[in-house]
Image (cartoon, grey):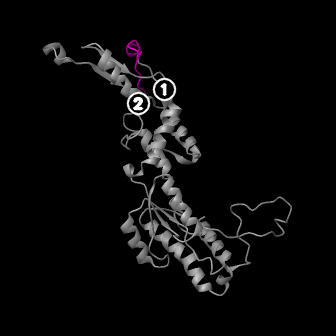
């Protein structure tokens, strides 16, 4: 404003609150939490998350600039704000809700900053007198923002490496990625060949690895009974090799598999309504194919793999 007073430059000053919306740089709170939620990672909050901010959707802020430009008075200052305040914890919980995540499991409180502003608040009555008003409710703006990041993976770099090109699940995963406009490629390596897996990761540079590959038998699972070495080599050793390669590179891996691993027994009699729990050991040994799936379950329960980055279910 000094140049306006001293030299008469036609200056109008605007002061804004926290803006959010599509195309925002991912270091900012809202896009950062959205991207972390999409990747299945923790949402870190400084301190106790009680710091409050007033969030405005970018479209409303753009309209405010337009109103100030055409109706504002030279030499004046206009606040662009909202009376609807939300704590950082509120924002994290709202994002968890839209992603159907359990906030208590996903939100992680970390050491607070040396100085962390407790509150920003602006009186926007002067701007409202020019005819501007906030149009986009927080819930609506947040949904539109999440939708934009889902539809623009190239902007922030999400990419899946998928194994299981010829299988039903592998094909379905590729279709789902196409529908959500997520970049992806099929792996070319064989699960039991560590070097080929490492070459795939180097070539694709994925953010996530999805494994739906496995030996199911030719023409059916009965084939596995007479080809146990080939079956266990791919379904168990191969999957664990891929998990280890991903662990070394800090990549999130999820394993998709089908197979019967439980059958009725004395503790779970037919018709009793008693179901198997997550910690119950697989007890079905009717087919070797299913036994290989049960082996993976045991490795997940007792292995040293980091459960936050490798999911073998």
| CA gap, disc 2 and disc 1 | 18 Å
Please give the range of residues in magenta.
119-131
Which residue appears at 64% of the width and 68% of the height? 258
Quadrant in which residue 17 is drawn: top left
Q: Residues within 10 Å of mark 1 (few under 14, many from 20)?
A: some
* Residue 282 percent location from the top left of the image: 70, 70
Frontmost residue, 241 versus 80? 80
The residue that appears at 42% across and 76% down in the rendered structure is: 196
Residue farthest to the right?
Answer: 271
Residue 272 placed where, x, y %? 86, 60
Residue 128 within the segment the image draws in magenta: yes
Q: Quadrant of the N terminus?
A: top left
Residue drawn at (49%, 57%), measured in percent from left and top? 177
Labelled pair 2, 1 in contact (Cβ < 8 Å): no
Residue carrying label 1: 85
Classed neighbour count for the residue bearing mark 2: other residues with Cα under 10 Å, few (<14), some (14–19), many (≥20): some
Q: Residue at x 31, y 22 (%)?
A: 14
Q: Secondary structure at mark 2?
A: helix
Image quarter of the C terminus: bottom right
- In the rendered structure, the answer to whether residue 169 lies left or right of residue 127 reads right
Q: What secondary structure do most residues of the magenta stretch adopt?
A: loop
Please say whether residue 43 is one of the residues in the magenta stretch: no
- Residue 110 at least partly seen: no
Residue 296 in the image, given as x and y percentages of width and height: 61, 71
Query: Which circle marks residue 114 in the picture?
Result: none
Give the mark toward the camera: 2 or 1: 2
Give the number of callouts: 2
Where residue 286 sits: x, y (%)?
74, 78
Res 161 seen here? yes
Q: Secondary structure at mark 1?
A: strand
Question: Would residue 47 be found to the left or right of residue 266 on screen?
Answer: left
The residue carrying mark 2 is 59
């Amino acid at each position: 404003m000094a140049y306006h007073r001293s030299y008469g430059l036609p200056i109008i000053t605007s002061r804004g609150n926290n803006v959010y919306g599509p195309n925002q740089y991912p270091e900012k709170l809202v896009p950062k939490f959205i991207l972390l939620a999409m990747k299945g990672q923790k949402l870190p909050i400084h301190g106790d998350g009680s710091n409050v901010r007033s969030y405005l959707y970018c479209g409303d802020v753009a309209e405010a600039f337009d109103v100030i430009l055409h109706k504002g008075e030279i030499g004046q200052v206009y606040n662009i704000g909202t009376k609807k305040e939300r704590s950082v914890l509120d924002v994290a919980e709202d994002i968890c809700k839209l992603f159907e995540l359990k906030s208590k499991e996903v939100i992680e409180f970390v050491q607070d900053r040396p100085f962390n502003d407790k509150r920003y608040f602006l009186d926007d009555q002067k701007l409202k007198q020019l005819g501007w008003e906030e149009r986009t409710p927080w819930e609506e703006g947040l949904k539109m923002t999440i939708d934009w990041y889902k539809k623009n993976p190239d902007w922030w770099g999400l990419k899946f490496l998928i194994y299981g090109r010829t299988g039903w699940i592998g094909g379905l995963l590729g279709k789902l990625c196409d529908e959500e406009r997520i970049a992806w490629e099929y792996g070319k390596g064989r699960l039991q060949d560590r070097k080929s897996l490492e070459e795939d990761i180097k070539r694709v540079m994925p953010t996530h690895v999805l494994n739906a590959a496995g030996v199911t038998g030719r023409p059916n699972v009965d084939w596995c009974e007479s080809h146990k070495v080939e079956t266990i080599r791919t379904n168990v050793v191969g999957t664990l090799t891929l998990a280890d390669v991903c662990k070394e590179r800090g990549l999130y891996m999820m394993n998709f598999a089908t197979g019967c691993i439980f059958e009725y027994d004395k503790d779970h009699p037919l018709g009793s309504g008693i179901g198997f729990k997550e910690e119950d050991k697989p007890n079905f040994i009717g087919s070797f194919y299913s036994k290989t799936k049960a082996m993976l379950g045991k490795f997940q329960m007792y292995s040293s793999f980091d459960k936050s980055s490798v999911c073998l279910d």
